[in-house]
Amino acid sequence: MSEMTEYKPGTFCWPELVASDLGKAKDFYSKLFGWDITDVPIADDNVYSMASIGGREAGGLYQMWPEQAEQGIPTHWANYVSVANVDEVVKKAETLGANIIVEPMDVFDAGRMAVIMDPTGAVFSIWQAGKHIGARVVNEHGALVWNEIATKDTDKAKEFYTELFGWEADEMDMGDGMIYTAFMNADRPAAGMMAITSDMGDMPSVWSVYFAVDDCDKSVEEAKSLGGEVVVPPTDIPEVGRFSYLKDSQGGVFAIIKLIKQPD
């Protein structure tokens, strides 16, 4: 399934790049993924850049606000989860030990959002759809296909997200002592979780976005030619696909994957 008309609550629905240099970001991702990017005017002569694939919205990009830059926030991908009621989810998140980074706010008539830091330090956003449901295309080349949290406390994260979104946790032994958790949103996979290990250094808990690609190795070489860097080289996941973690030309981290079978 690649065409989306709605998102069940608890489903990741929108990837958004917060860029230190919007022009540089548009050049990198439009060439890497074949995105068509349209600037939509917003307040104070700023724009929100909408990325599309075949006329269908795939994600967004915007120039980092001055106050974000002053705080030393790097270029990064924000990950939005669809919810039925932002305000209720924020209240519940607080009772579960989360910190609210951005309080519930309306985004014109597009929808309502908030930004939350979970009890392990990973940040994510929530989205209550108005006129904008999120990505209209998923699982195709250059489109959202998966989200994954790497965390220093998998037990605490599992407790938080299963309580907050009603996800169920399915733990899988990947060998060599690695446990990978697939969060299920009813009968559909919602996201993945892995533990931050000592060989990852002083890495903070973080949510990452995966984009589908037609050829992992080819996309890695293309990213490198555009000024990107390889964080994890192309690697096979048995019966799943071939993936790589990359940095864009500004240091924003994201992942790509060529799946063996497209999600239903």
Image (cartoon, rainbow, N blue to C red):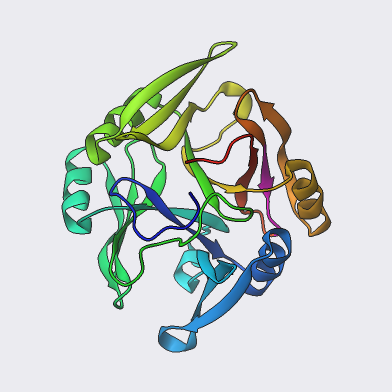
* Residue 227 higher or lower than 209, as above or below: below
Give the residue at the far top of this rendering.
176
Classify residue 76 as left or right of residue 106: right
Where's residue 221, x and y in %? 82, 48
Q: Is residue 200 above or below residue 19?
A: above
Residue 171 visible in the picture: yes
Q: Residue at x 34, y 54 (%)?
A: 7
Residue 19, given in percent of the width and then of the height, sits at 57, 65
Please name whichever residue, 67 or 59, is drawn nearer the observer in this view of the structure: 59
Q: Residue at x 47, y 18 (%)?
A: 172
Residue 109 painted magenta? no
Whether 47 is drawn above or below 20: the answer is: below
Relative to residue 178, is residue 211 depicted above or below? below
| Residue 17 located left or right of residue 141 | left
Residue 1 appears at what percent x and percent y? 48, 49
Task: Report the front residue among 209 and 121.
Answer: 209
Question: Magenta part mainly helix, strand or loop?
Answer: strand
- Extent of the magenta region: 243-249
Label total for image: 0
The reply, left or right, for residue 86 in relation to residue 207 is: left
In the image, taking residue 127 as reference, residue 192 lies left or right, namely right
What is the residue that sits farthest to the bottom in this orientation? 45
Q: Is residue 61 visible?
A: no
| Residue sitting at x 71%, y 64% | 28
